[in-house]
Every structure is written in structure tokens, then in C-alpha cells.
Image (spheres, helix red, strand yellow):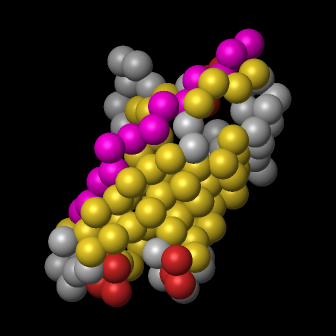
């Protein structure tokens, strides 16, 4: 099993920055790719950014150039640096881990980000 706990959400003005963190525990050596997803009110959950165990990253077009995903395997942690935040970035942000040989999914409880205009 893999457990994930997010932190770092909050209220920020448009143009500001936040850094989200995700701490993994449990079977951390079985973790493959990790990612950040978000879900805005009334919308489906969407991928924001992902990173493989080798460090390859990909981003949603809406956040390219503003958000940076990184992971520290030694600390079993995942990060999302969010700059130039926009009101449309307001959502609950979830940490996700793909783990195990059969590609199981683990999710955190989510952290709320509110960007005021």
C-alpha cells in the first residue's frame, strides 16, 4: 500500500505563487510515476503535471511555463511549484502515485487552492 498526504494549499491573489507538497509512505519503493491532478467545482478531475521515476515530466497545456513538478525520491516527496497563478487555477489539488507491478493508483486527500482576482 502507498499513502499520500498533500500540503501547501491556501488562498493567494492572482499572479502569486504557491508550492504544494506530497509526502508518500508505505511501499514507496514500488512507486513508479507520480502526478498532480486537480478538480474544480462542477468539473472533472484533470491531470496537471506528471513525472516518471526517471524524471521525465509532462504538463497540461494550461499550466505549461507556470507550474513545475519535481520529486525527491530520497524524501519520498512530490512537489508542485505554481507561479503566476490565475483564478481558473482554483481547485482541489490531488497527489497521485502509480505503484506496484500492476500499476495500482494511490490518491491523497487533496489540498484546496483558491486564487482570488
Answer with left or right where residue 57 lies relative to residue 101: right
Identity of the residue drawn at 77% across and 50% down: 65
> Magenta stretch: dominant SS?
strand
Residue 98 x %, y %: 32, 69
Identity of the residue drawn at 55% across and 55% down: 21
Answer with left or right where residue 95 lies relative to residue 49: left
Identity of the residue drawn at 74% across and 13% down: 117
Residue 110 placement: quadrant: top left
Position above or below: 91 against 37: above
Position above or below: 101 against 91: below
Does residue 52 show up? no
In the image, is residue 13 part of the stretch drawn in magenta? no
Answer with left or right where residue 96 lies relative to residue 53: left
Residue 47 x %, y %: 46, 48
Does residue 104 show up? yes
Residue range in magenta is 105-117
Residue 55 placement: quadrant: bottom right
Position above or below: 115 against 8: above
Between 55 and 112, the residue placed more toward the observer is 112
Residue 91 x %, y %: 49, 29
Residue 94 x %, y %: 41, 46
Answer with left or right where residue 81 lies relative to residue 105: right
Between 26 and 32, the residue placed more toward the observer is 26
The N terminus lies in quadrant: bottom left
Position above or below: 87 against 112: above
Identity of the residue drawn at 58% across and 49% down: 20
Between 29 and 57, the residue placed more toward the observer is 29
Amino acid at each position: 500500500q502507498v499513502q499520500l498526504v498533500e500540503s501547501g494549499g491556501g488562498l493567494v491573489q492572482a499572479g502569486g505563487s504557491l508550492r504544494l507538497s506530497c509526502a508518500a509512505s508505505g511501499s514507496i519503493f514500488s512507486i513508479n510515476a507520480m502526478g498532480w491532478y486537480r478538480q474544480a467545482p462542477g468539473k472533472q478531475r484533470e491531470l496537471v503535471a506528471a513525472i516518471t521515476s526517471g524524471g521525465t515530466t509532462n504538463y497540461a497545456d494550461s499550466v505549461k511555463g507556470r507550474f513545475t513538478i519535481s520529486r525527491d525520491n530520497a524524501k519520498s516527496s512530490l512537489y508542485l511549484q505554481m507561479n503566476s497563478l490565475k483564478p481558473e487555477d482554483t481547485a482541489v489539488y490531488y497527489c497521485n502515485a502509480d505503484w506496484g507491478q500492476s500499476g495500482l493508483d494511490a490518491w491523497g486527500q487533496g489540498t484546496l487552492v483558491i486564487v482570488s482576482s
